[in-house]
């Protein structure tokens, strides 16, 4: 049984086309995960910039005096 599992782990029983397809699918999943990470970073940085602008606007003494 150990011999069969080692053959499956080393991909000796898989065809070349199947191996190419599995690698392509794996790379697609990695790219998708990378894009989600980039999206999360951009959203957090934009949120941070927005909150900084709100704080800067709220601390504007000239505006608050006029109001």
Image (cartoon, helix red, strand yellow):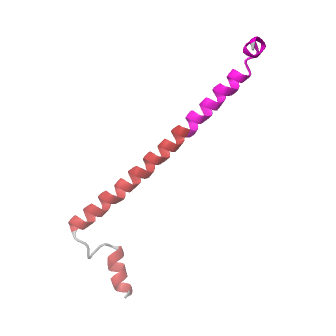
Q: Is residue 61 above or below residue 20?
A: above
Q: In which quarter of the image is residue 54?
A: top right
Front in this rendered view, residue 4 or 62:
62
Read off the magenta span. Answer: 44-66
Quadrant housing the C terminus: top right
Task: Tell me, yes or no, whether the highlighted magenta stretch contains residue 47.
Answer: yes
Q: Is residue 46 above or below residue 1?
A: above
Q: Which residue is drawn at 60% across and 30% down?
A: 49
Q: Residue at x 32, y 79 (%)?
A: 7
Query: Percent x, y for residue 64?
Result: 76, 16
Front in this rendered view, residue 28 or 54:
54
In the picture, measured across the screen, residue 17 lies left or right of residue 36, that is: left
Query: Percent x, y for residue 62?
Result: 74, 12
Quadrant housing the N terminus: bottom left
Front in this rendered view, residue 16 or 28:
28
Query: Percent x, y for residue 27?
Result: 35, 55
Q: Which residue is drawn at 33% across and 77% down?
A: 8
């Amino acid at each position: 049984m150990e011999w069969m599992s080692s053959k499956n782990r080393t991909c000796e029983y898989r065809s070349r086309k199947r191996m190419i397809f599995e690698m392509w699918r794996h790379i697609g999943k990695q790219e998708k995960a990378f894009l989600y990470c980039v999206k999360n970073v951009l959203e957090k940085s934009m949120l941070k910039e927005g909150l900084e602008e709100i704080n800067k606007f709220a601390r504007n003494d000239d505006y608050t005096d006029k109001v």
